Image (tube, rainbow, N blue to C red):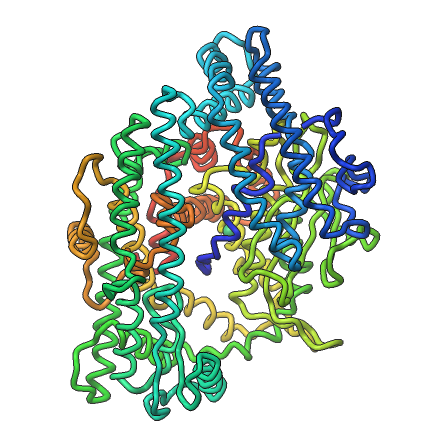
Amino acid sequence: MKLRLFLPLVGMVAMTASCNNIGGQSANNMDTLAASNPFYSDSKLPFQTADFDHLKSTDFKPAFEAAIKTQQAEVVKIADNTEKPTFENTLVALEKSGLLLRRVNCVFNLLVQANFDTILQKLNEEIAPKLTANTDAIYLNTKLFKRVETIYNERAQLKLDSESVRLTEYYYLKFKIAGAGLSDADKVTLKAINGEEASLSAKYTNQLNAANKAGALVITDSTELDGLSPGELAAAATAAKTAGMNGKWKISLQNTTQQPALKSLKNRATRQKLFEASWNRAEKNDSNDTRATIARIAEIRSQKAKLLGLPNFAAWQLQDQMAKTPEAVDQFLSKLIPAATAKAKGEAAEIQALIDQQKGGFQLQPWDWDFYSEQVRKAKFNIDENEEKPYFEVFNVLQNGIFYAANQLYGITFKERKDIPVYQKDVRVFEVFDKDGTSMALFYCDYFQRDNKNGGAWMDNLVVQSKLLGTKPVIYNVCNFTKPAEGEPALISYGDVTTMFHEFGHGLHGIFASQQYPSISGANTARDFVEFPSQFNEHWAMDPQVFKHYATHYKTGAPMPQALVDKIKKAATFNEGYSLTEILGAADLDMQWHKIAPGSPKQDIDKFEAQALKDTHLDLPQVPTRYRSSYFLHIWSNGYAAGYYAYLWTEMLDDDAFDWFKTHGGLTRENGDRFRDIVLSRGNSRDLSQMFRDFTGHEPKIEPMLENRGLK
Ligand SMILES: [Zn+2]
């Protein structure tokens, strides 16, 4: 069993596009940066980790400027080389370029998200377009692409090792996807489309933000809000007051279709009003209506695909993903739909029975679902978080749960390093030792919420592992648990426990990285693969041996009573029909929008959406899609176009891989070493599907996922 985490985008973006993806620099071109700047040279600290004791927010701007300039000069030099292109003088040279940028960016990415100040925030806005331009200057450089293409075409004759072949393919695909192979005229068209897409995405975000704000539900009579807690009521009153509506109550909209207050609002008419406020927020025929914007985005994305020689945008977007084609994604989704919708229908019947039992006298509607399902949940499981929390003290979970499981599986050990500088006093640093005692990585954890930290949880590298660069991994995990009062223990929920295991799973992907080249090292992999190691690691939270080792009462040390353990286990598959169906609806809409054939007329958003869900049998009246097209931020603006499925795809992988463990003796060193050898240590150095097949011995199977979701 496990908890599915729909982590904020920041985590994914940080992991796939931040410090890991930037090309590369060498020390000889640093004359533009003052020698007093801490980024001027490699850190002298262990693992070349960041020296937070001597870093100021003002150091970043000059370092970024020098770093971009340096990398551009390096890239021009590689592209203009008059010698015949070789693997060394082109691809290895690219990997070695941009070292300063990598160094600055890794530290900046951590601080701007986990410990920001106004200087860093302002710089973030300023530097983002410059970094994009820098990347474009590399991947749209025709001369450079010609060199890469030559090496790619000759790769079979070059006697390269397998990782070098993979790097060649990685670069070739990256250039191709960016459009480096187009004629100059087509590049002009592509840049125009990219430009229009970027401004439409920005317009969409602004419209949606305004629509979210304007769409909040305002209530004038507090009896309509019966069911909300005193705290929620007070918050709604404050929100109204802030908006100049003293004496009223305002319930703001969250970006999903269902709204948190729908769980507790007793007044059915209020529930309906709140639901409709959410559902129609961006479809009011006013300036915040996003429909025309997304119709145009979908249209130009299909034009872009055509320009790049592909049948549709999804086909273009999926080229470097594990799934590779839209057909593979559709096939995957279609395996889940019947089981998910059947379960959802069963849940609906259960809720209807409760409504009838209470003599409600109405048919279940989407705005009733959470309210009644919460009652069913309470009746069935009677879960109270305050009952479980005393068994989950955060650092006990870390040391006796997460570190313990990693030790049992992989033989690695951990030792706290109080001498390594940290950026905030709550941060703790551990040195990681391999099974033979060799020092292999640093692991930072920053678990508590702060005002100057983004929400959610994520992992990233401070230093990326690379044999070529002589660097070992420096990894961090950031979470947002409530900080206890001074001297009090930090007690967290079981959901938080699985978040910790999840982020540490990403951590292991970084810690075990053993690549020559930084671009394909560790967690630097496809979007539909990157959540595999992390979700896989969540499974160990409930492993009996691991659970017993960490779930002990913080005061008495007593193990958690079995009845409570059973309740936690059972509650995990509750309402899974609904939650999977709403996600499938969103994933399906995403795919259908991005399979539109080039040259198709502009779509009527509502008609298109209704037809799409009908075609795939996801049009359950009581289970609306998690995001309607008009407020599906992930796909119109946040880099998840034709990519929302990845959350579910990686779930299939991790459940299947865990199933392999179950049938081979579970938590053993032998199994752990095998997983490390075939998956965790390989980064993106091999074909991802092959990696998976080598581990499990078969193509990814859907059955373990259905079983874990309680759908079998
Ligand atoms: Zn994750």
* Residue 429: image location, x then y, percent: 74, 53
312 and 282: which is toward the camera:
282
Quarter-wise, where is residue 113 in the image? bottom right
**Does residue 22 appear left or right of residue 251 in this picture?**
right
Quarter-wise, where is residue 28 in the image? top right
Residue at the spot 25% in from the left edge and 63% down from the top edge = 283
Q: Is residue 566 above or below residue 118?
A: below
* Residue 83: image location, x then y, percent: 59, 6
Residue at the spot 57% in from the left edge and 60% down from the top edge = 454
Residue at the spot 69% in from the left edge and 74% down from the top edge = 489
198 and 21: which is toward the camera:
198
In this rendering, does residue 331 appear at all?
A: no
Residue at the spot 31% in from the left edge and 69% down from the top edge = 278
Q: Is residue 550 above or below residue 589?
A: below
**Does residue 228 appear left or right of residue 231 in this picture?**
left
Quarter-wise, where is residue 711 in the image? bottom left
176 and 415: which is toward the camera:
176
236 and 31: which is toward the camera:
31
In this rendering, does residue 570 appear at all?
A: yes
Q: Quadrant of the C terminus?
A: bottom left
**Does residue 349 appear left or right of residue 529 in this picture?**
left
Number of marks in picture: 0
* Residue 647: image location, x then y, percent: 40, 50
**Does residue 128 appear left or right of residue 598 in this picture?**
right
* Residue 160: image location, x then y, percent: 55, 14
Q: Quadrant of the N terminus?
A: bottom left
Q: Is residue 261 above or below residue 157?
A: below
